[in-house]
Amino acid sequence: MKALAASWRQFRIVLGKETVDALRDRRTLLRMMMPAVLMGPLVLFMISTLISSLEERAERREILAIGMDHAPTLRNYLERQTYTIKPAPADYEAQLRASRLLSPVLEVDAQFEDDLLHGKPAGVTIVSDSVNQRAQAGAAALRSALEGFQRERSLVAMALRGISPELLKPLDIAERDLASTQARATQLTGMVPMFIIMAVLYGALTAALDSTAGERERGSLEPLLMNPVPPMTLVAGKWGAVTLLGLAVALLSNLSFLSGQVLIRNDELQAMFHFGWIEVLRCFLLELPLACSMSALLMAVAIRTKTFKEAQTSSTLIMTLIGLAPMVTLMNPGAEAPWYFWVPGLGQNALMMLVLKGESLPLAKVLPSVLSGLGLTLLGLSLVAQSMRRAVAQ
């Protein structure tokens, strides 16, 4: 019991000392905290601004056209649907490619009215650019308007021949969306977990490198190892301070999305996006295994380097792999595969997406994340302790 109490006391001393050292560099601390605080408001503001601009463009109901003079019947229909028809600029193709023109262009064939009169398919072309996302979004609305004109012409032709228009509708198709309001919002806010994960990583990065490679470069690590403290206790104290700093930045990132909802300019998104105190707490708890494991792994990488700059370079691989892990869900859309929850970063992303959708967190999905985090934490700490024992022996 006395040995355990002594180890606990030594752990608290090291933890306090490393925490104070990490908080002492206020400039570095400010560089880490500011992005975490501003991240939520900026992301939500940008998403809502984009949605509002798309909706505003759709509400203007403007159609850019070339050759509309050849199609008075089509013009009449579109104007009855409250569309405003404007001539497209002469260099509309170049502007669409350069994303300077944000609306698709409707090209009407010169024989449009004649073909329509003789019962032939009248030619129209929707000109857009798939890289120009805003123009591509407007192309769907323009296609819908043209399909409406096509349906009206078909119904009129059938009515003139005494044929019931109901023959064109043998099915009465209804749609039922099973997704909840929160789940639909994740189509727009699905990047939120990725930003939170990056906050965890960058929150732990500086402290992990400074407490290992930084101290070695300053020459303060070797005297610290000469103290009568077991290497594992020393490692645990340093790791605890790094983890606390990473979790502090992660908490600020979570809270930024809570306060950032004030800046949402789109009413529909504001109604759908629910990120309250419960979601903050659930996301924060899900980040614990990631913060613990990444702190240990970053320390394990940094302790084997001689300079802070070398440690930064060596840790790039871990930061890249964990930061890009959530991209797997974009390349493989659909239900989460069971192995997702065992992968650091990817598992947290999948679990936080469940939180954003307002769904429950089954133990079968949470447990793999916890176990993999625990395993990586123990592996990282053992590697750091081994390196410190080797340094003491030398």
Image (spheres, rainbow, N blue to C red):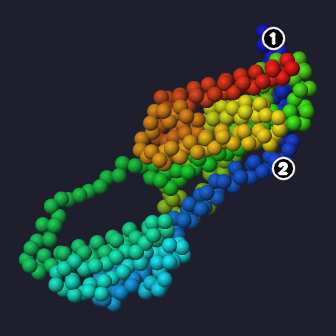
Visible residue check, residue 281? no
Of residue 315 and residue 289, the one placed in the foreground of this image is 315
- Position of residue 48 relative to residue 33, above or below, is below
Task: Mark 1 and mark 2 in contact? Answer it, CB < 8 Å.
Answer: no
Could you classify mark 1 by the number of other residues whose Cα lies within 10 Å: few (under 14), some (14-19), or many (20 or more)? few
Give the structural element (helix, strand or loop) at label 1.
helix
Q: Amino acid at mark 2?
A: Arg
Q: Residue at x 42, y 49 (%)?
A: 180
User: Quick one: which residue is furthest to the left in this view?
Assistant: 162
Q: Residue at x 75, y 26 (%)?
A: 384
Q: Residue at x 13, y 76 (%)?
A: 158
Q: Earlier in the sequence, mark 1 or mark 2?
A: 1
- Position of residue 125 relative to residue 89, above or below, is above
Q: Considering the image in quadrants, where does the N terminus appear?
A: top right
Which corner quadrant of the image does residue 381 belong to? Answer: top right
x and y, in percent, of residue 104 in the image: 43, 75
x and y, in percent, of residue 4 in the image: 78, 13
- Position of residue 29 relative to residue 53, above or below, is above
Q: How many marks?
A: 2
User: Of the numbered discs in the image, which one, if any, rests on residue 3?
Assistant: 1
User: Of the numbered discs in the image, which one, if any, rests on residue 259?
Assistant: none
Instruction: Give the side of residue 5 with respect to residue 69, left or right.
Output: right
Mark whose residue sits in front, 1 or 2: 2
Instruction: Give the side of residue 161 with respect to residue 61, left or right.
Output: left
x and y, in percent, of residue 226 in the image: 90, 21
x and y, in percent, of residue 26 in the image: 85, 47
Task: Give the residue number, with chain letter if any, for mark 2.
Answer: 27
